[in-house]
Amino acid sequence: MRVEEYAERRVELEGWPVNVTSWRLGETWHAKADNVSPGATLARIAAPSRQEAEEKAIARAQELLSRTHRRAV
Amino acid sequence: MSDYAHPEVLVTTQWVADHAADPNVRVVEIDVDTKAYDEGHVPGAIAWAWNTQLCDTLTRDILSKEQFERLNNDAGVGNNTTLVLYGDNNNWFAAWAFWQAKIYGHQDVRLMDGGRKKWLLEGRELSTEKPAVKPASGYRASDGDLSLRAFLTQVQEAERSHGAAMIDVRGPQEFSGEILAPPGLPETCQRGGHIPGARNVPWAKAANEDGTFKSFDELRQIYGGEGVDGSKPVIAYCRIGERSSHTWFALKYLLGYDNVRNYDGSWTEWGNLVGAPVERGAAAAAGQR
């Protein structure tokens, strides 16, 4: 099967820029959320629709990002 | 790719599409997120998990020579196999595997330029089937080439003597000490900041939007602008050594600098070390050191 409808967008979660990527493989939609710097994957979700996959990936990424502690330097 | 010092170590996604099924080619996906392979991978590719198959799981170390031989034998890889590595996050852990393959003397190992991201972006075929692998038995690794690796004592000496250009390839907020790990990931150190004297050149500066490496001229300008021009030894580090493998690859094979080491102990070692000097704050502009 080929990757179809690949799309990327940037959102801000908990003050951090995050890349949300989604695509379809057959009947399944895949989404992942990566922190922009350094670009590590925070969440990877498969779901029947793009909306559901992206929403779940964003929710999981938000949960993880909310735990990131900024220190004064 | 032709301007690179060693263009033979990179292959395009099209090359992989054309050659993945060749009998002397073994394509391996190595991801930061080891679930990515199961979502779909380059048809015919096998997977290596960085956290169980590309390190010693008891001692914090890379594979031993014997473990590396077993890994390749299990993958049906011979000494003359063309090993093509790719993965997510612009090939971070694929570069880590490449680095180990070079330590153990595998001659023909290559990265798929752009990694998993470019393959998806181009709408290429993905398979969810794991290929049947006929194990080999004759793989022989070389003794480890430790000139590619920096150990703590070498980094400490370089920090004291300024005998090497030190590149911290983490993000600016990790470098400054504002955060102890990439946003959203677990903190793995006791102190934030960077090794005194290190320059901050985040790994991503070497990559284009589609995940491919920037051109020779662009790379030379990026690293040269931070005083890294190949005239003295270079030590690259990050948090656990995989992002710095990406930079090590760019410096060693794309720019052709001879003396480049990857400090895989990285910040997880230095930032937990009792008594180690740490510098905090943003990177100074180039030329201000």
Image: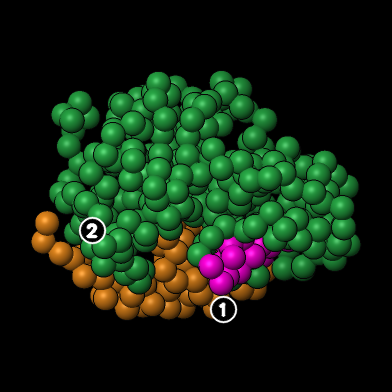
Chain colours: A orange, B green
Is A61 displayed left or right of B130 in the figure? left
> In the image, which disc is placed on residue A62?
none
Q: Which mark is residue B275?
A: 2
Q: Nearer the viewer, residue B245 or B118?
A: B245
Locate residue B79: give its quadrant: top right
Q: Which residue is mark 1?
A: A48
Amino acid on which the number 1 mark rests in the picture = Pro
Circle 2 chain = B
The chain under label 1 reads A
Q: Residue at x 47, y 39 (%)?
A: B261
Q: In the picture shown, does residue B127 fall above or below B264?
A: below
Whether residue B183 can be seen here = no
Residue B128 lies within the magenta run: no
**Quadrant assignment, res B199:** top left
The percent coordinates of residue A44 (x first, y second) are 49, 71
Pointer 1 and pointer 2 on the same chain: no
